[in-house]
Image (cartoon, helix red, strand yellow):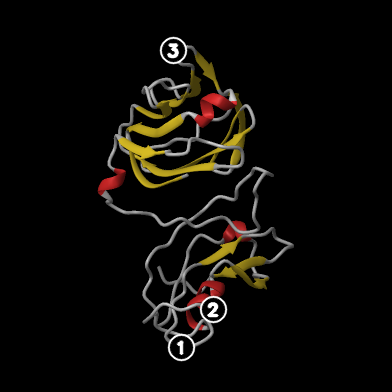
Amino acid sequence: MPSSRLPWAYMAARKLYGAWLQRGHCCHSHGKHLESTCCIPGTVLSPLKVSVNGQHFLHFRYRLPLSHVDTLGIFGDILVEAVGFLNINPFVEGSREYPAGHPFLLMSPRLEVPCSHALPQGLWPGQVIIVRALVLQEPKHFTLSLRDQASRAPVTLRASFTDRTLAWISPWGQKKLISAPFLFYPQRFFEVLLLCQEGGLKLALNGQGLGATSVNQQALEQLRELRISGSVRLYCVHS
């Protein structure tokens, strides 16, 4: 994906000193491993912010409006393990200057749909569930449910491609529509965040807060499984 329009990507590859031959903690010596880099776009008047291995590295003011930038270029004597485009956590609780870059596990058998992800300690205030995935061609639905040991689902989130709705589904099947634009499209990536808080869960889709649903704290603590099904290819499930 070479491009002369993104010199900050070139700097990240070239000025951090070469091949990643072994793991280390310092990115400023030859042969050390870059655990991660992260660039946060600003506005036309504010600079890009760049972090390296989770620590702030530099600010960079680009010569063009960021709305005109459409290509990422990476150059240099490096081995690229992953490239991801992440949304900033919109929740005030537990927010960080830079989003957590959990790896995309491409073609992982652990993420085959339907997928089951263990929640051995249940959910507690401040805990965040992250789901990143790609919508398949001719999709029908995407369903995320949180279940207890008896396989009851006090919390279910469902996106229906038939009627283009996003809704919470109660344990007895009642649908509560979420008033928001339908942001799921075939062959497009999406990110779901669920933030556990006292008495419920906050939802964000693609970095946009979409309100909350009420769940009593005891039910949240008794949850043991995150189950995902539908017309999606999963790349990251984290809790």
> Which residue is painted at 52% across and 36% down in the image?
123
Q: Please name the amino acid that badge 1 sits on.
A: His
Q: Earlier in the sequence, mark 3 or mark 1?
A: 1
Q: Position of residue 74 (x, y in %)?
A: 44, 72
Residue at the extreme right: 45
Nearest to viewer (mark 2 / mark 3): 3
Q: Position of residue 31 (x, y in %)?
A: 42, 85
Q: Which mark is residue 173?
A: 3
Circle 3 residues within 10 Å: few <14, some 14–19, many ≥20: few
> Which residue is painted at 52% across and 53% down in the image?
86
Q: Earlier in the sequence, mark 2 or mark 3?
A: 2
Name the quarter where the N terminus is drawn.
bottom left
Name the side, left or right, on which 210 lies relative to 32.
right
Between 6 and 95, the one lying in front of the other is: 95
Nearest to viewer (mark 1 / mark 2): 1
Name the side, left or right, on which 10 lies relative to 212.
left
